[in-house]
Image (cartoon, coloured by chain):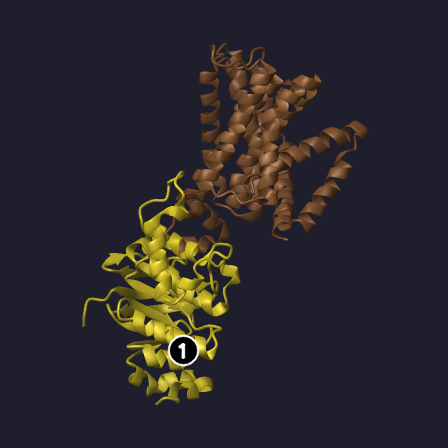
Amino acid sequence: MKLSFNARNVVVVLVIAGLLLLPVYSALSGKVFVLTLFTRIIIFALAAASLNLIMGYGGMMSFGHAAYLGIGGYAVGILAHEGIGSGFIQWPVALITSALFALVIGSLSLRTRGVYFIMITLAFAQMAYYVASGLSRYGGDDGLTIYKRSDFGGLINLSDRVQFYYVCLACLLGGVYLIWRIVNSRFGMVVQGVRSNEQRMQAIGFPAYRYRLVCFVISGTICGLAGALLANNTDFVSPAVMYWTRSGDLMVMVIFGGMGSLFGPVIGAIAFLLLEEFLSQFTEYWALIMGPLLLLIVLFARGGIMGILGRFSRG
Amino acid sequence: MAEPLMRVQNLVRRFGGILATDNLSLDVIPGELHAIIGPNGAGKTTLISQLTGQLTPNSGTIHFAGMDVTRLPAYRRSRLGLARSFQITSLLPNFTAIDNVALAAQAHDGHSFRFWGDARKEQHLREAALSALRRVGLEKRANVVVSELSHGEQRELELAVALATKPQLLLLDEPMAGLGVTESARMVGLLKELRKEVTIVLVEHDMEAVFALADRITVLVYGRVIASGGPDEIRNNEEVKRAYLGDQHAVTRRG
């Protein structure tokens, strides 16, 4: 990758450096909550990055992406509840279940377009929400407490805050790198081409549906990983993680940071969750401030924060 | 007469109560440039869309290279060597010219479920794309984003994209639409070169271009073929003159 020296790249490098050094700051200052907060931010950044793959690059406005957070989370929670504590089983199950769910949702919803697609993905996610609420054996509405985090033998100890933080960060950076490779690959070119002009892509010989579907599944799988991390982070999983407002939050993070920019969703997740954290200290009506902010971004900065930085570096 | 490359038999397509294609039959012979003309609303684009698979006919059959392709989706027909250009320029606006063409080459170079390697670094795709761009005289504009190309350049790029799929049959839907005089002349020159290598079906309003280029002309009115034959035959056909009453001078100007 050619790294040109512009505002966008400088910000990305600074953010990565900051995230890498954050545990040091937390240890030196004794502010444990910073580490906890940023662990959460990083997990949501991974989920937002996965949504960006289909929304930003693939033009698929999925309004049900939080479903995978829940599926990944319940895979960990249910297995833990049934006495299977090994992460080597829990995490692959979380990924595979998410992939299968995405395959089913995708194969049906990708036959539709526009508002219908948004509504169908939303409907499926709400279905998952109600199914989880009905799982009385696993806590139903109240959710399921996870008494022991995923066990990776002597390899890593997820109960250690710093180790868990770095595991999450590695997942995020790995996920973003994977998405970067995919976006520039043959496959990624096709998916972006289909977003831009599906009829044209069919005419030059691409079965557009298949490529969109595979992209949808990859995205869901990555989000499933975020779900597994989230369950470990909160030691708890409940239907609430799948509620449609969660899906909305993820979309807002992507739009905030910049749809279709590789690192945008990470910046978006940081901005969104920090704002939420600090605004909610002053008022419980923090959404009243967040809403207009989002409006401003949508109206005046289509490319989100990354777009603003891009414009800045061109000037 | 040689075995036709494309044979259309009794094609019918309705939109509600309107017969857009009315029991239409048509042969395209290998090597020819076959023009399809007709007044506005004659069903020319509807016909092209059925030939390429964007639209499915209500009845009738389409054979291409000896195969029944009537129910085949567009992408499969493209793989068989059927390419089209669009009447309304239909490129990928936020891709560069060369990316547009390279994608077309990629579509005909195995499957694209490759997730890791950088597609823009695949030399043979880049070279295939560049050579198609060279054919239409756009090689110097390879790295320009499509939305910044002029309308004329976009029309030429449409052609380069179609060429990059290595077609046996090129269906061109009004390649001259919206072009100025010089640009039109360039396009005619380009088509004169291309027709030496590939069979072409040309839908066009520019009568001068059609009569200069075509080996055979088929005239459509209200979705029906009213005449088909060589340029001279068509020029002197009474029914064609009548159908074109308003534009009669356009048909007869060169006659």
Which quarter of the figure has residue A137?
top right
The residue carrying mark 1 is: B185
Chain letter of disc 1? B
Location of residue B11 with respect to A100 vertically, above or below: below
The chain letter of the brown chain reads A
Q: Position of residue A24 (x, y in %)?
A: 63, 20
Judge by depth and name the residue closer to the eye, A193 or A244. Answer: A193
Q: Is residue A1 above or below residue B38?
A: above
Q: Which chain is yellow?
A: B
What quarter of the picture does the C terminus of chain B occupy? Answer: bottom left
Whether residue B131 sits left or right of residue B20 in the image: it is: left
Instruction: State the quadrant of the N terminus of chain B.
Output: bottom left
Locate residue B155 relative to residue A66 in the image: left or right.
Answer: left
Q: In the structure shown, which secondary structural element does the residue marked by tag 1 occupy?
A: helix
Tell me the quarter of the picture where residue B39 sits: bottom left
* Residue in the foreground of this view, choosing between A286 and A212: A286
Q: Position of residue A48 (x, y in %)?
A: 58, 35
Give the percent coordinates (x, y) of residue A177: 48, 34
Which residue is pictured at 36% across the width and 58% down the height?
B130
